[in-house]
């Protein structure tokens, strides 16, 4: 299965996501989810995991989630009471600017968790806003950037011989 969106520029402030998970559980087990927009703005993402309306969980265990121009997964953590969780145990997440962005859109302390492990392949940086309630639990995977700041306690990020990075206990 392949799902794509190739929107044009409608101006800043309009979300142009291939998929927007606004409450519930979204499982990606295979296929390709892609945003093919040609304009790089903060509003073009392959998946928007948005906890404004309800608890959201995104589980990626296979396939590809990609947006060559901007963000693979935007984790829009907009609630202090509703969980916003992104679990990546396999597959590939690619972002031209950022692979996964844990965004705090306001001055509150929203809840959000990023867990990356096992056979995850992350191409592009991880980016996180500020919140005392943000939890980072990277325990495995392969990355194109150093993810030391996101490692779970006791885990370390090391560069592999091929130039990628891995996370090890």
Image: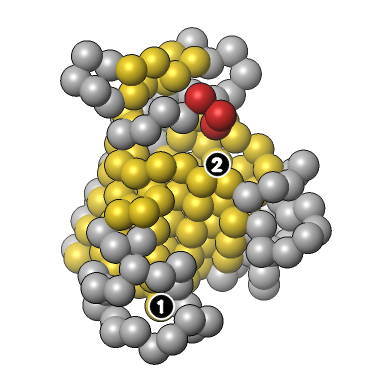
User: In the image, what residue occupies the spot 66% across and 57% down?
Assistant: 104
Secondary structure under badge 2?
Answer: strand
Q: Position of residue 164 (x, y in %)?
A: 27, 26
Q: Position of residue 44 (x, y in %)?
A: 39, 70
User: In the image, what residue occupies the spot 78% across and 60% down?
Assistant: 107
Q: Residue 146 appears in which quarter of the rendering? A: top left
- Image quarter in which the N terminus is found: bottom left
Q: Is residue 15 above or below residue 25?
A: below
Q: Nearer the viewer, mark 1 or mark 2?
A: 1
Q: Is residue 75 left or right of residue 1?
A: right
Mark linked to residue 114: 2
Q: Residues within 10 Å of mark 1 (few under 14, many from 20)?
A: many
Query: Which of the colour schemes (rainbow, by chain, secondary structure, one colour) is used?
Result: secondary structure
Q: Residue 166 appears in which quarter of the rendering? A: top left
Q: Is residue 80 left or right of residue 56?
A: right
Q: Residue 133 appears in which quarter of the rendering? A: top right
Which label's residue is closer to the chain start, 1 or 2?
1
Report which residue position mark 1 lands on. Answer: 16
- The CA span between labels 1 and 2 is 22 Å
Q: Residue furthest bottom?
A: 10
Work out whether residue 169 or residue 42 is closer to the camera in this orientation and state it: 42
Work out whether residue 79 or residue 123 is closer to the camera in this orientation and state it: 123
Q: Is residue 41 above or below residue 155?
A: below
Q: Position of residue 41 (x, y in %)?
A: 40, 70
Please indicate, yes or no, whether residue 27 appears anywhere in the rendered image: no
Work out whether residue 26 or residue 43 is closer to the camera in this orientation and state it: 43
């Amino acid at each position: 299965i392949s799902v794509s969106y190739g929107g044009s520029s409608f101006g800043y402030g309009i979300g142009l996501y291939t998929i927007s998970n606004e409450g519930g559980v979204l499982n990606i087990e295979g296929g390709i989810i892609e945003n093919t927009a040609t304009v790089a703005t903060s509003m073009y993402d392959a998946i928007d995991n948005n906890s404004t309306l309800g608890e959201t969980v995104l589980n990626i265990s296979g396939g590809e989630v990609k947006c060559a121009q901007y963000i693979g997964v935007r984790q829009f953590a907009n609630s202090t009471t509703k969980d916003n969780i992104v679990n990546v145990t396999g597959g590939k997440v690619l972002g031209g600017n950022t692979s996964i962005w844990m965004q705090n859109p306001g001055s509150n302390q929203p809840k959000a968790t990023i867990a990356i492990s096992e056979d995850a392949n992350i191409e592009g940086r991880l980016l996180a806003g500020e919140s005392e309630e943000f939890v980072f639990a990277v325990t495995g995977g392969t990355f194109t950037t150093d993810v030391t700041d996101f490692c779970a306690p006791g885990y370390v990020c090391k560069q592999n011989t091929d130039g990628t990075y891995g996370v090890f206990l």
